[in-house]
Image: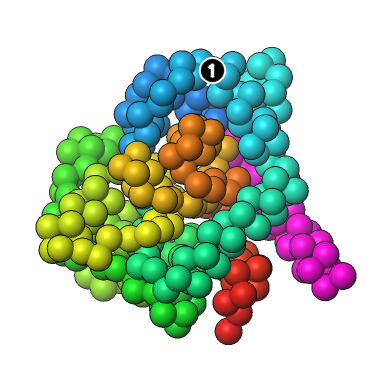
Amino acid sequence: MASVSTAARLRAHLVAARLAGVVATSREDSLRSYRLFAARDPRVLIGIDPEGAWGVRDLLGLMAEKCGVSADLRYISGPDVIDPERTLAALDAFAGRIREVARRGAPVLLGTGHPRPLLGFYAGLADALSAAGCEVLTPAQGRCVDILTRFGLRTHRLDYVRGVALVREPASGRPGREPGAHSHSPLPVRVALDAAAEAGGPLPELVVGDHGWVCGAGQLGFEAIGLADTDDPALFVGEAEGRVSVAVPVDDAVRSAHYLPLIRYVLNRACLSQ
């Protein structure tokens, strides 16, 4: 009964904080991402090289199955929706992979392209995994990565905060204060994994994160799990095609404090509560 009660409380929180239920991500943004993915735009593929055809109708069907968005092509504007029951089921699977890697004390790599809202979530996982005996890897710290942005090619620097990888723009003018740049690119995880391999290992047995961190690692054959919004079809395609182990449907851009109950839930399910 306790676990049922815990899940019910988290479900209520997901809806109240708009992590699931009616979310801030618009239907227009989601459909735009599906069209770009169908056209194989690398900005939306974010590291996944799809094996299937994945037209817009196929993607909409997949996202309806995985996230709970409307499968009706005639619904073209307004807010998008995530089914909180699908979020809870995916969080259970996510916790299962965390529990397994913790049981083995295996090395892990965590990274985020959404550092402002999600850094605390991943840092909480990094702390718990480290306490369980896992090596939290930090390869290629300080390495420069050239990332294509809407403003053109920009040089970023790979950094780690509390064991979580992110990228910063060196010219941000706020050293030590800037939380990191928003990025979808798979290049940072490729640089990190290349550096770990060049150093002779260890290599991560699990990569945890979002955006290009999950897709880039999964495409290279590393087990990867993470969070994804309704306008991030790449992670769900990767899951459907077997290159991403778990994609958790959730709004990835709400206030950072709203993710704290998710950390507690995952650690509880992974038997890592502190």
The residue depicted at 18 percent of the width and 57 percent of the height is 197
Q: Is residue 22 left or right of residue 114?
A: right
**SS for callout 1:** helix
217 is higher (above) or lower (below) than 108: above
Quadrant, the N terminus: bottom right
Image location (x, y in percent) of residue 104: 45, 71
Q: Is residue 251 visible?
A: no
Quadrant in which residue 3 is drawn = bottom right
Colour scheme in use: rainbow
- Which residue is nearer to you in this view: 171 or 180? 180
Quadrant in which residue 230 is drawn = top right
Tag 1 residue: 56
The residue depicted at 57 percent of the width and 19 percent of the height is 58
Q: Is residue 245 left or right of residue 20?
A: left
State the predominant SS element of the stretch in magenta.
helix
Q: Amino acid at mark 1?
A: Val
Image location (x, y in percent) of residue 187: 24, 45
- Which residue is nearer to you in this view: 120 or 54? 54
Count all numbered tags in the image, as a single digit.
1
Q: Is residue 6 magenta?
A: yes
The residue depicted at 46 percent of the width and 43 percent of the height is 244
Image location (x, y in percent) of residue 166: 31, 59
Magenta segment range?
A: 1-28
Image location (x, y in percent) of residue 189: 28, 51
For disc 1, the neighbor class at 10 Å (few under 14, some 14 to 19, many from 20) is: some
Quadrant in which residue 50 is drawn = top left
Quadrant, the C terminus: bottom right
Q: Is residue 209 visible?
A: yes
The residue depicted at 57 percent of the width and 56 percent of the height is 94
56 is higher (above) or lower (below) than 203: above
Query: Looking at the image, which residue sits at the far right?
Result: 1
